[in-house]
Amino acid sequence: MIELKARKYWNSQREGFKQSLEYIQGRMKGLIKSIKTPWVKFNDATTDGLEWHSITVIGGRPASGKTLIKDQLIRSAFKLNAGEDFRALEFQFEMLARTSAIREYSAVLGKPYKHLCSAGSTLSENELKQCYEYAKERIKYPIDVVEEACTVAEFKHIIDEYMEEHSHINDNQLKVYKKTIITLDHSVLLKKAPYEKDKFDTLYNLGETLTALKRKYPVAFIILTQLNRDINSPERNEDGRYGNYVLESDIFGADALLQHADTVIGIDRPGKRKIRFYGPDRYVIENDTILVFHFLKCRNGDTRMSFFKSEFEKMQIVEMETPPQQERRLKL
């Protein structure tokens, strides 16, 4: 028989109401803020950006721009939120830190990644100097990177260690943890533990772990994941079909992640799927640079569909107007 520890398992609702009033008053006075992103549409769909103690899941097929979105968000976070005291911890399993840094130079110089590597054209001394100057400023930001793949248990252990290392005791003798943006690129690259049957089991454990960590620490998780291959089926790529849209069920391991996430965004690149008129509203897709953000779940915001343009040569995503709809001829 399991012997339960003597502890109280419940709290009065009084505490919840007390904390809620403190929170909304802090927001009202500007003492508590979300982390603003570079995109007005993103901020508007959410609670003015990324809330602390939250989980954001971004799903998309390969080459849809997921990592670029994450990189731009982190790259701009410290500039757009000047005066806010926070760090960033990136679990970067897919891409080397070196590669990520070169992509940043690409965005700053407005030059392709290949040019930065002197492939096809040689990097100039002046451009190299700009890279040095950017790096000199960029390394001032408190960002740390984990490159070695790990299990969910190891992921939790690393975060616990990190948060402890960057904590302090305040004047009231209470431990205060540093606000931290934590990114995971990608969820499917987490190692499967011996006690996990498959990747879905790993994702279930990840979801539960993320929820436990967001309740314990002032963190904002950004989790990148894949979409299921069904999105590429021929019937879903026919012009004007509802199936053109990214759905909740398209998120890989949706059942494992959706219930834990506060915000879920499905990224689509219709032009890459040869879709010219997108969805039943038949939005005109001019080329494969157009990205669609499907805000599938916004626990504290609004679900919607927003359009963006990918500038991969400059390693950035920019907002754009909603495309026009195909004109429909009336039958006489």
Image (cartoon, rainbow, N blue to C red):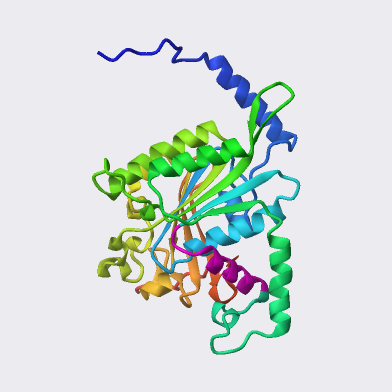
Kindly report the secondary structure that dominates the magenta region of the rendered protein: helix
Q: Quadrant of the N terminus?
A: top left
Q: Position of residue 117 (x, y in %)?
A: 56, 80
* Residue at x 26% of width, y 67% of height: 235
> Can I make out residue 329 in this image?
no
Q: Which residue does the image show at 29% across and 62% down from the upper left? A: 229
Displayed quadrant of residue 7: top left
Q: Is residue 138 above or below residue 315?
A: above
Dividing the picture into quarters, in which one does residue 272 lie? bottom left
Residue 201's quadrant in the figure?
top left
Q: Which of 110/276 is in front? A: 110
In the rendered view, does 91 fall on the left or right side of 2?
A: right
Horizontal and vertical percent position of residue 144: 59, 52
Quadrant placement of the C terminus: bottom left
Residue at (71, 56) in percent of width and height: 140
Q: Is residue 220 visible?
A: yes
Q: Who's the residue at 46% across and 12% down the image?
A: 8
- Say whether residue 134 is left or right of residue 1: right
Measured along the vertical axis of the image, is residue 219 above or below residue 231?
Answer: above
Please state the extent of the stretch shown in magenta in the rendering.
Answer: 93-108
Q: Nearer the viewer, residue 325 or 73?
A: 73
| Foreground residue among 18 and 102 | 102
Q: What is the x, y in percent for residue 88?
A: 60, 49
Is residue 171 or residue 107 the one in the foreground?
Answer: 171
